[in-house]
Amino acid sequence: MKNVIVNVLFILTLFFNNHRLFAEQLISLFLKPYPVVSAKNASEKLAPKLNKLGKMATNRSKYIMPASTSGIFATYGGFLTVSDLNGEISFPRKTGKPIIYLLVTEQLTPIIMSANTIHHWELQEEESSKMYKFEKKWDDEFKVWYWDATQEPLPENNVIPLESITIFANPKFVYVPLGITMAKETPHLILPDIYIKNGLNLTQNALFILNLTHYFGSILPMYKKQPQSYSRHLTY
């Protein structure tokens, strides 16, 4: 019986000393459909376009149907993901600062350091882009956390900040509310909701991402033979 208790205590010690069991902090945001205009406003916008043959169904869906928030690609901190059926985008949190930049653009240019290792990303000058800054702040008067969202000028050297989340989309179809939004008290960074307008070309964005997928492969271990052992190196 004594041996059993010792073994159980030993297992529990290993369990609580295993740091990998702690949940990783995340950065999350939700994409929501941009509010659909009223039926009256929709009909007023749709009427001038009815005389264009073959465009009636397209224009009707543009002004009446809600936008899709799933299947939109985003990247951050060396990770590439796509919004799920709920419009959620999540990344492992790689910064201790409560500041996140959000870049909305259709294409980026990777600047290669070696092989498939990217040194940084740069904007393509011919592409339209918008950048926003989210900073989590504390209000001493009301004792609450809040997000302060502002639109920022694009980098003059076109270099994307490391702490940036990039959403691959045409900026005219993405609405980012500016100003103050209440924030949740959590170790995770849950950004304010972002709104997607109808008309976003998901297929075009997905085809561009296909050219970048080889930069987001897993880390592979490689072994080099030493006189009496093997040394391990990591390659990307």
Image (cartoon, rainbow, N blue to C red):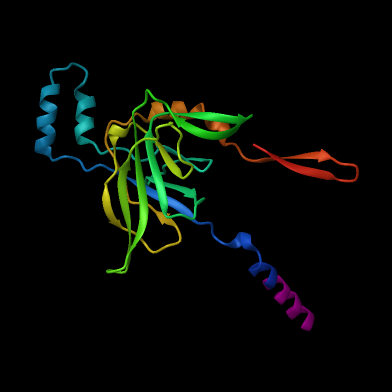
Horizontally, residue 231 falls left or right of residue 22, namely right
* Residue farthest toward the top in the current orientation of the protein: 53
Q: How many marks?
A: 0
Place of residue 214 in the rendered image (x, y in percent of width and height, measured from the top left): 57, 31
Q: Identify the residue shown where x is 10% and y is 26%.
A: 47
Task: Answer yes or no: is residue 78 visible.
Answer: yes
Q: Is residue 21 above or below residue 27?
A: below
Could you say which is closer to the camera, residue 107 or residue 35? 107
Q: Identify the residue shown where x is 43% and y is 42%.
A: 165
Q: Identify the residue shown where x is 71% and y is 71%.
A: 11
Could you say which is closer to the camera, residue 66 or residue 157? 157
Main SS of residues in magenta: helix
Q: Quadrant of the C terminus?
A: top right
Q: Is residue 141 above or below residue 59?
A: below
Q: Which residues are magenta?
A: 1-12
Q: Is residue 6 above or below residue 157?
A: below
Place of residue 185 in the rendered image (x, y in percent of width and height, measured from the top left): 39, 64
Could you say which is closer to the camera, residue 20 or residue 40? 20
Q: Is residue 65 magenta?
A: no
Q: Identify the residue shown where x is 38% and y is 38%.
A: 103
Place of residue 46 in the rendered image (x, y in percent of width and height, measured from the top left): 14, 28
Q: Quadrant of the N terminus?
A: bottom right
* Residue farthest toward the right in the current orientation of the protein: 227
Q: Which picture quadrant has residue 62?
A: top left
Horizontally, residue 18 falls left or right of residue 153, namely right
Task: Answer yes or no: is residue 1 visible.
Answer: no
* Residue farthest toward the front in the current orientation of the protein: 156
Q: Which picture quadrant has residue 231?
A: top right
